[in-house]
């Protein structure tokens, strides 16, 4: 028990030793507004350098579609997560109100639709079909992982509790895409996945915005290219809405 107490005390001290205080005694941070804002790095921060924020951003998203199917027609549990590791590059050496962000991003998207996707092998197209009484599954979704390069312009007000506005886009690669169906037979739960859609769009590109305060922001994103690229396939463009949390 004593060892655990000592380890906790060391951890708390390591976080608080890097904290700074203003004239009113409040904790402030020049460089890190998120969960690690007490940590000031291995070297003291240089006071003449512009402040840097939003370098590790997690977007917790609700995922939907636009196109042949309108928004908000899918299940509410269509959740996903984007993890963005970014460089925050001030546009001028003396001004941190405007900066340029670039990095790498991983996206996991999951759309719970409870219908089904059918592949037409002769035409190499994908169709979206409503569930009927002969279908045994009780839950279905379209999910996938992608990697992309986000590029964005960032604007923020002065101070630690700053207002911020990000606008930008992403270009990347759809690493995998699969349809998942859950059935229950003889009291057993079975999950089947279907990969290798013949007409899936491997190249993805989208636009996004963030509006918030300090390390919290509202997030929205829209993909310009459809999930399935053939004109005879169902036309669905990704739509994301959610909350962004800046951890570093």
Image (tube, rainbow, N blue to C red):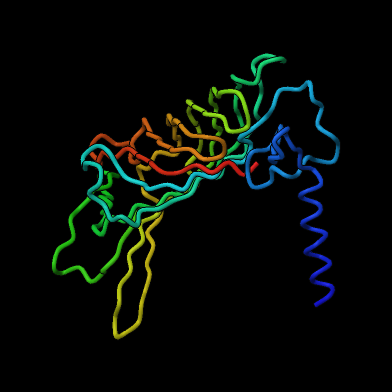
Residue drawn at (51%, 34%) of the image: 213
Residue 106 in view (yes/no): no
**Which quadrant of the figure contains the N terminus?**
bottom right
Rendered position, 133 above or below 107:
below
- Residue at figure coordinates x 37%, y 42% from the top left: 200
Q: Is residue 128 left or right of residue 153?
A: left
Q: Residue at x 14, y 63 (%)?
A: 132
Residue 34 to residue 211: above or below:
below
Residue 21: horizontal and vertical position, in percent?
Answer: 74, 37
Image coords of residue 9 (percent x, y): 80, 62
Q: Is residue 84 left or right of residue 194?
A: right
Task: In this rendered view, identify the residue nearer to me: 59 or 27.
Answer: 27
Q: Would residue 155 be visible to someone looking at this image?
A: yes
**Residue farthest along the bottom direction in this orientation:** 186
Where residue 245 sits in the image (x, y, percent)? 54, 43
Rendered view: 246 above or below 208: below
Instruction: Specify whether 186 is left or right of 12.
Output: left
- Looking at the rendered image, the quarter that the C terminus falls into is top right
Check the image and name the residue furthest to the left.
Answer: 133
Q: Return the residue nearer the eye: 25 or 223.
A: 25
Quarter of the image where one finds residue 29? top right
Task: Give coordinates of residue 204: x percent, y percent.
Answer: 44, 35
For the point 31% across and 55% down, the residue is 76
Q: How many marks?
A: 0
Foreground of the two, 191 or 229: 191
């Amino acid at each position: 028990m004593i060892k655990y107490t000592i380890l906790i005390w060391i951890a708390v001290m390591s976080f608080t030793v890097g904290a700074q205080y203003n004239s009113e005694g409040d904790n402030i941070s020049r460089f890190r507004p998120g969960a690690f804002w007490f940590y000031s790095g291995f070297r003291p921060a240089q006071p003449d350098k512009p402040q840097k924020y939003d370098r590790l951003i997690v977007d917790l998203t609700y995922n939907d579609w636009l196109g042949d199917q309108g928004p908000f027609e899918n299940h509410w549990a269509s959740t996903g997560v984007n993890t963005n590791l970014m460089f925050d590059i001030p546009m001028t050496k003396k001004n941190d109100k405007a900066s340029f962000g670039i990095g790498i991003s991983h996206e996991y998207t999951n759309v719970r639709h409870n219908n089904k996707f059918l592949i037409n092998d002769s035409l190499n197209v994908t169709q979206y079909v409503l569930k009927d009484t002969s279908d045994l599954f009780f839950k279905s979704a379209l999910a996938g992982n992608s990697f992309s390069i986000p590029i964005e312009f960032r604007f923020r007000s002065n101070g630690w509790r700053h207002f911020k506005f990000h606008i930008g886009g992403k270009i990347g690669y759809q690493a995998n895409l699969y349809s998942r169906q859950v059935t229950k037979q003889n009291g057993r739960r079975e999950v089947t996945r279907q990969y290798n859609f013949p007409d899936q769009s491997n190249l993805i590109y989208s636009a996004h915005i963030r509006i918030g305060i300090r390390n919290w922001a509202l997030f929205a994103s829209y993909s310009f290219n459809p999930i399935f690229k053939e004109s005879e396939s169902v036309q669905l463009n990704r739509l994301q809405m959610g909350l962004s949390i800046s951890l570093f």
